[in-house]
Amino acid sequence: MANSVYTGADGSITLSTPEGTEGGAAQTVIDEHEMVSVGRATGVTIEVQSDVKAFHEIGQRYASELRPGNIHIQGTIERAYINGALVKLMLGEAATSRPAASWAQPAFNITVLADNPALPGTRSSITLHEVKLDQWSYTMPEDDFIMEGASFQALYMTVEDEAA
């Protein structure tokens, strides 16, 4: 595959939902806000951390083995289009009223696609599966755009690269 360089202008973000109660709760918000495609996003970060553990033998300065540990997938998204969709994806039905009992927190998939227009058919996509938002923020600066932001965690991710 040829090396390709992307910018944020080459990217797009789409949402989909997994099966189940949490996916259904997210689908309701996505349909209500026509949010299959996430618009006005200015920043997306995706971080993958692996808890690699080094095993050191007595009398050895270098590790004799590296063992894989837990994997953590997290990130953030910022956008300038404020319509309550992100906070509703975090809180579900609790965003509009106080539920009498416990409720399902919405879970959804995020696909980040980078498609280079100079090389048609060359693209890179990352799909984050069963994402849950764990923090939401709203920023109203004096002389700049109002932004909302959210941080998230994903259950797992898949990566796909296509070459022309």
Image: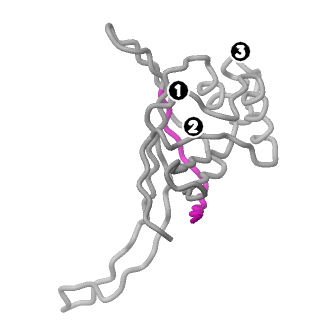
Q: Which mark is residue 133?
A: 2
Q: Is residue 107 magenta?
A: no
What amino acid type is highlighted by mark number 1?
Arg
The image shows residue 127, relative to residue 83, as above or below, that is below
Which residue is pictured at 77% across the width and 35% down the height? Answer: 27
Tell me where residue 38 appears, x and y as whole percent: 61, 32
Secondary structure, magenta segment, majority class: strand
- The mark that comes first in sequence, 1 or 3, is 1
Residue 72 appears at what percent x and percent y? 49, 57
Magenta segment boundaries in residue numbering: 149-164
Neighbour tally class for label 1: few under 14, some 14-19, many 20 plus, Cα within 10 Å: few
Quadrant showing the C terminus: bottom right
- Say whether marks 1 and 3 touch (CB < 8 Å): no
Question: Depth-wise, is mark 2 or mark 1 nearer the camera?
Answer: 1
Q: Amino acid at mark 3?
A: Ser
Q: Which residue is mark 1?
A: 40
Residue at the spot of label 3: 97
